[in-house]
Image: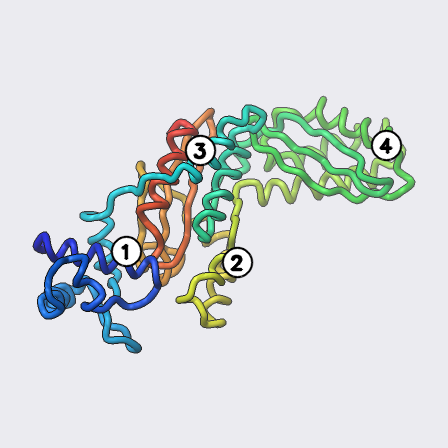
Amino acid sequence: MISQRQAELLKLIVEEHIKTAKAVSSNSLCDSLDCSSATIRNEMAALEDLGLIEKTHISSGRIPSEKGYRYYVDNIMEPKKLTGEDMLKLQTIFHNKSLVLSDAILRSMEIISELTSYTSIVLGNASKENRLSKVEAIPIDKNRIVAIVITDKGHVENKNIFIESTVSIEEVQKTIELINKLIVGTPIEEISSKLEYEIKPIISQYVTQYETLYNAFYNAFSEFSNEANVRITGTSNILKQPEFNDTAKIGEILKKFDDRDLINSIKEEENGINIYVGSENEFDDDVGVIKTKFEANGEVGTIAIIGPKRMEYDRVFALLEYIKENIGG
């Protein structure tokens, strides 16, 4: 257990390093703690002996260690009060009654990514837990339509479909009608199989260009099944963090964002909002991950924020807390 002054000192070092990404010197803390530089150096030495702060190679100052961040998160940190601007941006999303739940969650995480310059991830239901509710099609030009796929969990996905110019819009609409009539209620991951073995023979009886349309929709549903449960926003935000100025490290992390198995491992099983510092997370030792499980209207998933190890844990915690409250926990 550390003393009250040491706890106050650790808090200042953590929060100053989060703000500046630089090592913190004893001289810079004299006014805040109202004591001499020598006293602060002694207390810093004690914190260093405990493994809570460490020296850097390029400065005489100190930065928090992974253990120091953990102590700060567990014993010192308090969720930061949201600013009026932060709250207003999020309220706009949750007060928009035209948005289904999945879109509200996704948009709110996009806003958090914009506000913090971190990366946000939404892991929704596995595709097997989503059933087809409706398919709609909007013609863009003579060769393209946008297929809108809606699931029973409120998930909405748009897919661009290229069709040959010989296919009429009437045949597209007829195909959509047959799909809605014959496979609504089918689990998303089973649709491709059902299209191939059950729907294709029926479409061929009513639609002249059935082969072209069947292939287009088959591909669209296959992509939807594979991608529907992962949404990542702000992957390039890692480039804005000064500690990631090494191109090899940036490349390594960006590659991890493309690894769907690794991203899916971020799924949260524990209740509450949980913070994983450095080696505590499975993603990367040089980042912090804050994540929480959500459950609302039958939809279950995980929302997570990934940032540098010196991320604003108190602010992100408060932002995720606000989202959880507004989607029903």
**Which residue is the site of mark 2?**
236
Mark earlier in primary sequence (4, 2): 4
State the residue position of label 3.
Answer: 300
103 vs 6, left or right, is right
Which-is-in-front pick, marks 4 and 2? 2
| Horizontal and vertical percent position of residue 106 | 52, 39
N-terminal label among 2 and 3: 2
Q: Residue flagged by tag 2: what amino acid is it? A: Ser
Kindly report which numbered mark, 2 or 3, lies closer to the viewer in this rendering: 2
Residue at figure coordinates x 72%, y 29% from the top left:
136
- Percent position (x, y) of residue 294? 40, 34
Rendering coords of residue 67 (x, y %):
22, 59
Alpha-carbon span between mark 1 and mark 3: 34 Å
- Residue 15's label in the rendered image is 1
For label 2, the crowd category at 10 Å Cα-Cα, with few meaning under 14, some 14 to 19 and many 20 or more, is few
> Viewer-nearest of labels 2 and 1?
1
Distance (Cα) linking label 2 and label 3: 27 Å
Residue 77 vs residue 255, the one in the foreground: 77
